[in-house]
Image (spheres, grey):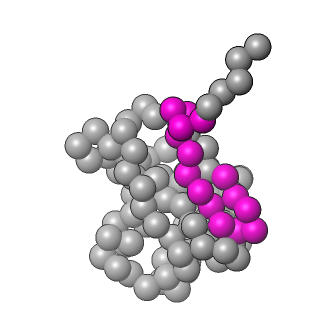
Amino acid sequence: MQKLIRDGKVAVLYSPGFGAGWSTWNLNFPDCVFDPEIVRMLEKETDAYEIAQFAEQKYGDDFYAGGADDLQIVWIPEGTKFIINEYDGSESFRSEASIEWIVA
């Protein structure tokens, strides 16, 4: 799995808009959450349609690229444990440190 790392932080892709999730709607494609080529495309402000086409070509017919419309990058420290939650297509990012665990 390739990742884009800068200054000790990893680029993570997620789609906070309602309608379609990026990684949560593509569980069979775990690489899509870190895809360095798509990160670079976003940084260059590439059109969402072009990003969607690129992702569908790269990952195949089973990949759903609807989340490309609201795709964003979050930079997290390398080694951070995190999850991406989804509600009605809207993805949100949570790190392990932000969760208040209940201890038995």
Asked if residue 96 is positioned above or below residue 56 in the image, the reply reads above
In the visual, does 102 lie left or right of 82? right
Quadrant (top left, top right, bottom left, bottom right) of the C terminus: top right
Task: Give the number of marks.
Answer: 0
Report whether residue 77 is seen. yes
* Dominant secondary-structure state across the stretch colored magenta: strand
Is residue 98 in the magenta section? yes
Kindly indicate the quadrant of the structure image that contains residue 66.
bottom right
Q: Nearer the viewer, residue 30 or 95?
A: 95
Which residue is found at the position 43% from the left and 47% from the top? 2
Asked if residue 3 is positioned above or below residue 56 in the image, the reply reads above
Which residue is found at the position 60% from the left and 73% from the top? 17
Q: Position of residue 22 (x, y in %)?
A: 61, 65
Which residue is found at the position 34% from the left and 66% from the top? 40
Asked if residue 26 is positioned above or below residue 4 in the image, the reply reads below
Q: Position of residue 68 (x, y in %)?
A: 55, 75
Asked if residue 30 is positioned above or below residue 62 in the image, the reply reads above
Q: Nearer the viewer, residue 53 or 39?
A: 39
Q: Residue furthest top?
A: 104
Q: Position of residue 6 (x, y in %)?
A: 26, 47
Kindly indicate the quadrant of the structure image that contains residue 21.
bottom right
Report whether residue 56 is seen. no
Which residue is found at the position 46% from the left and 53% from the top? 12
Which range is magenta?
85-99
Q: Position of residue 69 (x, y in %)?
A: 55, 80
Q: Nearer the viewer, residue 28 or 43?
A: 43
In the visual, does 84 lie left or right of 39? right
In the visual, does 39 lie left or right of 31? left
Is residue 93 in the magenta section? yes
